[in-house]
């Protein structure tokens, strides 16, 4: 019961905070902070699930880290992702590209949820979270190296910027 209520409260509060932050801070740093927070949470869940004995302490520690993950995801990554997706595609394909991006995001979300218990059964809980941590490092590297700041730029200037890259 505590986990479900905390999950809902964190999701709602973090979403409002994230939407509020979008107008006040740059998008790229907000996304990088969110990725650092989620990736660190995944690493700590992997470590604690490896070193702590099963029980109440481990359960609350992992619940706390799961809520931290959720706060960074809902408060930084999700709002920035959806906003930037609307900014980075050229006008002529924006609708289609947003639809495909949304489809892929929801499909991956479904696959993670669908295969999570299978991954835990195959590899262990800690190894599963270490795998997610590694994917978080890939995401961090990609955003750091390739994603430009979009705040304060017109859609037309962003389109010209991305056209120069391709």
Image: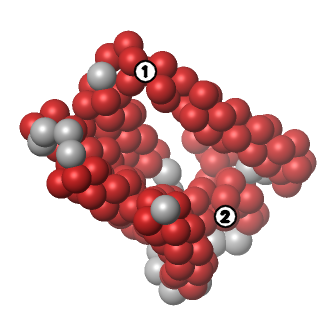
For residue 145, what is the image quadrant?
top left
Q: Quadrant of residue 119?
A: top left
Q: Disc 2 marks which residue?
A: 83
Q: Secondary structure at mark 2?
A: helix
Q: Secondary structure at mark 1?
A: helix
Q: Is residue 11 visible?
A: no
Give the total of numbered labels: 2
Task: Report how far apart the C-alphas of labels 1 and 2 lie in the structure.
Answer: 31 Å
Q: Nearer the viewer, residue 127 or 131?
A: 127
Upstream in sequence: badge 1 or badge 2 = 2
Could you tell me which residue is drawn at 65 percent across and 34 percent down?
A: 110
Residue topped by disc 1: 119
Tell me if I can see residue 113 in this picture. Answer: yes
Using the image, determine if residue 43 lies above or below residue 76: above
Please tell me how crowded label 1 is: few (under 14), some (14-19), or many (20+) other residues with Cα within 10 Å. Answer: some
Graded by Cα atoms within 10 Å as few (under 14), some (14 to 19) or many (20 or more), the crowding at tag 2 reads: some
């Amino acid at each position: 019961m505590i986990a479900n209520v905390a999950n809902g409260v964190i999701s709602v509060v973090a979403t409002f905070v994230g939407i509020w932050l979008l107008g006040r801070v740059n998008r790229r740093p907000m996304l990088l902070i969110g990725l650092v927070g989620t990736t660190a949470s995944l690493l700590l869940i992997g470590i604690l699930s490896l070193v702590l004995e099963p029980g109440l302490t481990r359960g609350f520690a992992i619940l706390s880290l799961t809520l931290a993950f959720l706060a960074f995801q809902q408060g930084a990554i999700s709002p920035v992702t959806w906003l930037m997706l609307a900014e980075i595609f050229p006008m002529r394909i924006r609708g289609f590209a947003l639809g495909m991006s949304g489809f892929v995001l929801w499909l991956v979300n479904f696959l993670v949820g669908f295969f999570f218990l299978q991954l835990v059964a195959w590899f262990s809980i800690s190894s599963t979270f270490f795998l997610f941590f590694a994917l978080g490092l890939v995401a961090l590297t990609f955003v750091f190296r390739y994603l430009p700041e979009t705040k304060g730029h017109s859609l037309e200037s962003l389109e010209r910027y991305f056209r120069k890259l391709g």
